[in-house]
Image (cartoon, rainbow, N blue to C red):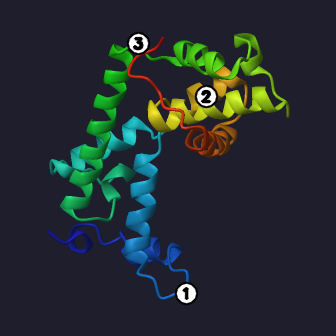
Amino acid sequence: MNSHNEFPFLKTEDVLSVFDNNTGADPSQLYREFIRKWVENKDCNNDFLKLIKGANQERENMYEPGFWVIGSRKFVKDAIEQDSLKRARVAQHKILGWGHDNLAQYVCSLTSVNIKDIRTRGRMDSISDARKLFCYFAVKVLDMTRIETALKLNVTRTAVAYLARQGEKIALERNIQLPLSPI
């Protein structure tokens, strides 16, 4: 089925022109990469994935933008599979007892930071390192959302992403790993 025949107002060229960066890169590939990164985002809107799943099951609705995703069936199926695997990992972490509170206790035990201080902003090395490790383990290891983690630390989601990258460096430098279950 050709969407141009059924929905002549849909102009894929218009969408792809947004991703044309004049570098010679394929705009279709740039669009797919954009969508893949968005779907992998820990704070991804679950309604969007439901729309993709509906499109994958050939339930089309021209009034729902999620059905306008440009990509092959394989791309859509891969996105859905990644989402399912992530959900399974999150459920496993919860079964093992990991949550923000248990994670904060673990990080504080590593860094000798008081549990109430982990919410304190500042440039004090030990507290700053504890916050970075907390963000790293929360969003990159335990698949917790950036928004929930941000609320726990009273920072923005963008700050959580930055802190997580810094925390990963600290964890690698100090060879710190998350145990299977909380202490």
- The answer to whether any part of residue 11 appears in the image is no
User: Residue tagged by mark 2?
Assistant: 134
As measured in the structure, the alpha-carbon distance from the residue carrying label 1 to the one carrying label 2 is 40 Å
The label nearer to you, 1 versus 2, is: 2
Q: Quadrant of the N terminus?
A: bottom left
Side (left or right) of 182 relative to 126: left
Side (left or right) of 36 relative to 138: left
Q: Nearer the viewer, residue 68 or 164?
A: 164
First of labels 2, 3 by sequence position: 3
Taking the spot 58% from the left edge, 31% from the top edge, the residue there is 147
- Estimate the x, y position of residue 21 in percent, counting from the top left: 55, 80
User: Residue tagged by mark 3?
Assistant: 97
Q: Secondary structure at mark 1?
A: loop
Taking the spot 56% from the left edge, 13% from the top edge, the residue there is 101
Point out which mark residue 79 bears: none
**What amino acid is labelled 3 in the image?**
Gly
Q: Quadrant of residue 69?
A: bottom left
As measured in the structure, the alpha-carbon distance from the residue carrying label 1 to the one carrying label 3 is 49 Å
- Estimate the x, y position of residue 72 in percent, counting from the top left: 23, 65
User: Residue tagged by mark 1?
Assistant: 22
* Above or below 128: residue 16: below
Q: Quadrant of residue 117?
A: top right
**What amino acid is labelled 1 in the image?**
Asn
**What amino acid is labelled 2 in the image?**
Phe
- Estimate the x, y position of residue 82 in percent, counting from the top left: 29, 45
Taking the spot 76% from the left edge, 32% from the top edge, the residue there is 128
